[in-house]
Image (spheres, coloured by chain):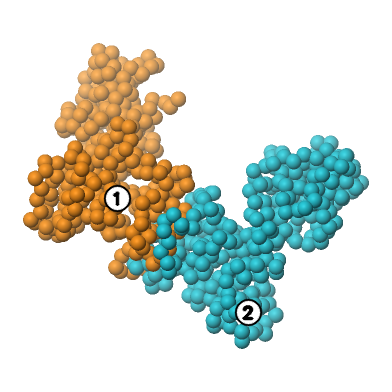
Chain colours: A cyan, B orange
Amino acid sequence: MENYLEQAILLAQMVNGQTGTNPPVGAVVVKHGRIIGLGAHLRKGDKHAEIQAIDMAGEANVKDASIYVSLEPCSHYGSTPPCAKRIIDTGIKKVVYAAKDITLDTAGHQMMVEAGIDVEYRPMKQALDLYADFFKSKSDGRPIVTVKVSASLDGKQATDLEESQWITSKAVKQDVFNLRHNHDAIITGNGTLRKDNPSLTTRIEDGHHPAKVILSRSGDVNWNAQLFKDETTPIYIYTENHSLTSTEDHIHIIKANQLNIDFILKDLFQKGFGRILVEAGPNVTSQFLASLDVTNFILYLAPKIIGGQGKYQFYQTNDVMPLDQLPQFEIVHSEIIDTDMKLRMKRK
Amino acid sequence: MENYLEQAILLAQMVNGQTGTNPPVGAVVVKHGRIIGLGAHLRKGDKHAEIQAIDMAGEANVKDASIYVSLEPCSHYGSTPPCAKRIIDTGIKKVVYAAKDITLDTAGHQMMVEAGIDVEYRPMKQALDLYADFFKSKSDGRPIVTVKVSASLDGKQATDLEESQWITSKAVKQDVFNLRHNHDAIITGNGTLRKDNPSLTTRIEDGHHPAKVILSRSGDVNWNAQLFKDETTPIYIYTENHSLTSTEDHIHIIKANQLNIDFILKDLFQKGFGRILVEAGPNVTSQFLASLDVTNFILYLAPKIIGGQGKYQFYQTNDVMPLDQLPQFEIVHSEIIDTDMKLRMKRK
């Protein structure tokens, strides 16, 4: 069995992807050697993990208890009162947390120490990994961006004749559903709507459908595309076409004189989208991969070679970059999924 | 500690790559609970592993001993007398082996059983894996062919401006030296001589330099290329140019009216080359990858994306193949080498 701090981190990992621009946090309240309350921050605007856990234990029972939290308890009045204050008020005597919240001005740690609580910062790799992207995103004012590509070993998303369905296996498709489930929104290009016509849904039990974001400079949107059939999930269309409109409530049109990644990402972050998945064709994919705003790059490689002249190479640029100035990534995880390879990478 | 049969397989693995068209075999002779002889087949034409082990033990000491062998002892008179007969003659009372030699007509197993020896076939995955390629190669009359490619994530061996040095890390280079060391010959194209000018050597301590095979239809060979500087390693040039000659003893020119992979591989096998490594540019690489004669495909992926228009995609074909008819591979092993990914695949 994991220890209590690891359990708090596990709880945080369970809600990772459903807290928007807020961090996923888990908390465990322990007294007399057993867990008396569990909590997690379930969504932005909702109770913080510490409060959930204290509430589950019952305020009256928490006196002299210990609380284990994945992230340092907050000390500021945001949409909820500070957790540090609530911990002090309930008479908890010991706090252990696994990562510091570097985006906050006042430390919850100090506030609780001054109230006489035994506070320990016990850094844990799983927690630091969990929050690194979140802290960067918060200070940049841009979402965590993951680019997902399924390609052949020779770097192609489709044959020269546009054949692309099932390059990777069905097991990868299921993994992509999980990936979608863990993001707030999916960005795709208008070209993908025309060619692949994906529904971009999450076919997992009780899964979450991320919002859909369509990039279309021209605004020449194919309204018959599959993804417009789902009217319960919001759709955002970014366009340079100032005459584009929609009468549908769930369709939002954002116009700009010149669309660029920076504008789109900042706007999405302000709308509360903390984690964005890019699932698009070579054009949009290449622009994101060339950008420094990409946090994660997930590449599914099918062990086949497509050849041809390579019209649908997933990464193509107009300019030739010198080898020492190319976008570089660090491979942080690799696994074989059925017959295919999954690489998870970070932009270096 | 491994058991004796596993030790015999380890010995075989140690000599894998240095036995030409013969299988790598290891043997351990055991008596009174301890190893009294170790052996391995060191090179084609040399003593078989069982004989090496018996000789190390001393013929007089082998009576009533057990012998563990990675492969079924042979029963035929080839360049050496049959091992099964020698085992019978020495009075060994027990034989355990880990893989059957399916390319032989008469079974050594049966021959030894009839002589009253306790013979056990104990199949071991490591041994079956070790010999699968060898058996196929022997029955096809073609070498084991490994294609090695170093590429960016988007499947390119070089930028559009031909810049290709150090796409992958120095640690990969070292791995490639080991790969070369384990092969009898390296095939490359004339284009690679012109562009990369590699020496194709094995810079490892006491390493083996494989023979070099250059494919050049035109015979327009750049005799100043780096690899001609090493006069101790044989070079084979396959060409359609019937007037091509060389006065150097170590350079062999093989002429054909029409060069094709089948002809080249059969000819190399007849010359005694059991394991061939293909290290070439997109042209030669693509031809081999498209061929069913490829046994192994080793792909080193550097986590960078080259982009451009993709003039040096490692796999390119004139025709567009439908997705369900593409060359497919099975990923049998993957590992991260320093910053890069290594995938070892088998043709499916």
Looking at numbered disc 2 in the image, what kind of residue is underneath it?
Answer: Lys
Residue A229 % position (x, y): 61, 77
Q: Residue drawn at (85%, 51%), measured in percent from left and top?
A: A55
Relative vertical location of residue A184 with respect to residue A58 in this rendering, above or below:
below
Near-viewer residue (B142 or B112): B142
Residue A210 % position (x, y): 64, 67
Residue B32 % position (x, y): 37, 14
Task: For mark 1, give the secondary structure.
Answer: loop
Near-viewer residue (B262 or A187): A187
Q: Give the quadrant of the N terminus of chain A.
A: top right
Q: Which residue is mark 2?
A: A255
The answer to whether marks 2 and 1 mark residues whose Cβ atoms lie closer than 8 Å is: no
Q: Residue drawn at (80%, 51%), measured in percent from left and top?
A: A106
Q: Residue drawn at (40%, 44%), measured in percent from left and top?
A: B170
Looking at numbered disc 1 in the image, what kind of residue is underneath it?
Answer: Glu
In the image, is A111 to the left or to the right of B285? right
| Neighbour tally class for label 2: few under 14, some 14-19, many 20 plus, Cα within 10 Å | some
Q: Which residue is mark 1?
A: B279
In the image, is B54 to the left or to the right of A264? left
